[in-house]
Image: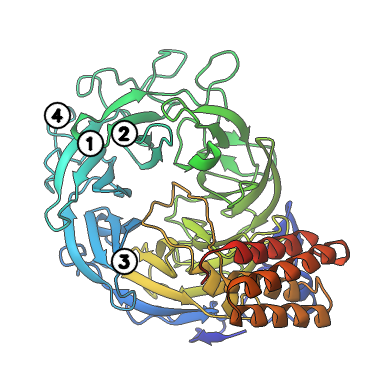
Amino acid sequence: MNTEATTRRPRGMAARVWPVVLAAGLLGATDAAAQAPRQPDPRVGLKAGFMDAGEAARNMELVGHHNKAPGFSNPANNGDFAFANSDMAFSGNRLFMGSYHGVQVFDISNPRTPAVVATIACPGGQGDVSVYRNLLFLSVEETRGRLDCGAQGVRDTVSTERFRGVRIFDISDVRNPRQVASVQTCRGSHTHTLVPDPRDPANLYVYVSGTSQVRSPSELAGCSGRRPSEDPNTSYFRIEVIQVPVARPQEARIVSMPRVFANAEGSPAGLWQGGNHGEGTQTTAQTNQCHDITVYPQMGLAAGACSGNGILMDIRDPANPVRIDQVSDPNFAYWHSATFNNDGTKVLFSDEWGGGTAPRCRDTDRPEWGADAIFTLTNRKLTQVGYYKLPAAQTALENCVAHNGSLIPVPGRDIQVQSWYQGGISIVDFTDGARPVEIAFFDRGPQDANQMLIGGYWSSYWYNGNIYGSEIGRGLDVFQLKPSDMLSQNEIDAAKLVTFREFNPQNQQRLEWPAAFVVARAYVDQLARGNALVPSRLTAIRTSLSRAERMSGATRRTALNTLATSLDRDVARAADPERVRMLSAAVRQLATARTTR
């Protein structure tokens, strides 16, 4: 296991570390972790500093960085949240980074030397971004947002100058973006999710999650901040759905406002009412909004992290999503985000306890709070099986809690890279949802040695072979994975075969691997790591793959089909029969492929 770290700790600070795994609320560990002696974690006690903080890394390395674009920082205050970086979206060799000040566009053709190619100064909130072909979408929630993107704000409580909702820009010329639509909503847009309809490519849908106060009906007709008992048309307890004609984005409009929290009796406020769940439990927010919605169009499903509940929705009719299941957790304060695994058999929900601005990873904080909760998904029903929280305790000077992440496309495994604000970046394998385990990390010390300045990683995502981190105060970081006993070079190389033209993390695309010998070798490495076949058999499989790779035409096909048939016989005696089946399928894919990698 490779470790690179600077571990300059203040005197008297012990290196404390939590257990990595929490299964159904109980501490657990992988067999290897249970047998290994616990070592001091290099993330604990790192030197504070803005651009010179101590760093610790394991099984990943920082390979590229770019400071914030000119005009997107406050040199007099490194913690000025008016310039905080936020979420990211990707298209080709472009990375779009949202912020409270607008959008920065980076050229990532060379990930080691990202470069700013354009900016859009347009304040109005955290600036959630998504991209679809030549269109850029930007969330606006704060009352200072203006139709003209001005920085002067809006003073009047009711104003025709105010904008809160979703902006749409034409970025055909990324250096000269044009705002072509602005769809107003009653609570603004904290986040949004793009939802393509496979049956209707002419239209794109946008799910809007508003979490702010309701604006006056004098400013936007139809808005109501009353309770459901006072007004059944309240602007709370719903999401908005925008339809965007792709060829005519200027005609974008709200087409539905689904009551996805309603109960069987028709009350809009049908889910968690807010408060604690009993003695010793968390105080959970009322379910009157979604913070984030992740869609998986190929499965016709969406997972909503909706303040007091996690919900599952049927989105086969994208304009009219329907809730089909809901879950609650006495350890969650605020359901924040969601990630499906690739085969749609698990959902990982995160809890943003403290809102992202508080230190919630201290050694005195409960490890089930501010963590991830892992659910299995069977017959469209969610069942909780485990928890995961960053295993290295952070200081009171570091805002830290579970935040945004995405899958890393390693075949045969469920692996997520995830941000923890000033807790850094953690990469977790949740293939066994009851026994998740960290396999890599990167972290820096606090931004300031004397006070807490809000910072750290807002988002970290895998995109076309690299991990990109949106650092709230410091800029853009780029990472690469390193092989270890927990992740082989073959697995990393297989992950790099999965590429996207566009990537919006809240719109999950099914991961598919091309016919490649490295994919088969990744499965073999996994079988070896799990002692699923005897060593002599693993050696024979590797030898057969190497011989077949040197062949061509019918000779190669025959050799690969022979190997696949022998693997079928291995299933009955393997400790991990399903993984042997995956290997056999990968070998048969090689046998039938016209070209291989």
Q: Nearer the viewer, residue 518 or 11?
A: 518
Q: Which mark is residue 159?
A: 4
Residue 42 in the figure: left or right of residue 105:
right
At label 4, the amino acid type is Ser
Q: Nearer the viewer, residue 71 or 500?
A: 500
Specify few, some or many for label 1: CA neighbours under 10 Å numbering under 14, 14-19, or 20 or more.
few
Q: Which mark is residue 202?
A: 2
Residue that mark 3 sits on: 473
At label 2, the amino acid type is Ala
Residue that mark 1 sits on: 247
First along the sequence among labels 3 and 2: 2
- How much space separates mark 1 and mark 3, taking CA atoms? 37 Å
Specify few, some or many for label 2: CA neighbours under 10 Å numbering under 14, 14-19, or 20 or more.
few
Query: Is label 2 in a helix, a strand or a loop?
Result: loop
Specify few, some or many for label 4: CA neighbours under 10 Å numbering under 14, 14-19, or 20 or more.
some
Q: Is residue 533 above or below residue 120?
A: below
First along the sequence among labels 2 and 1: 2
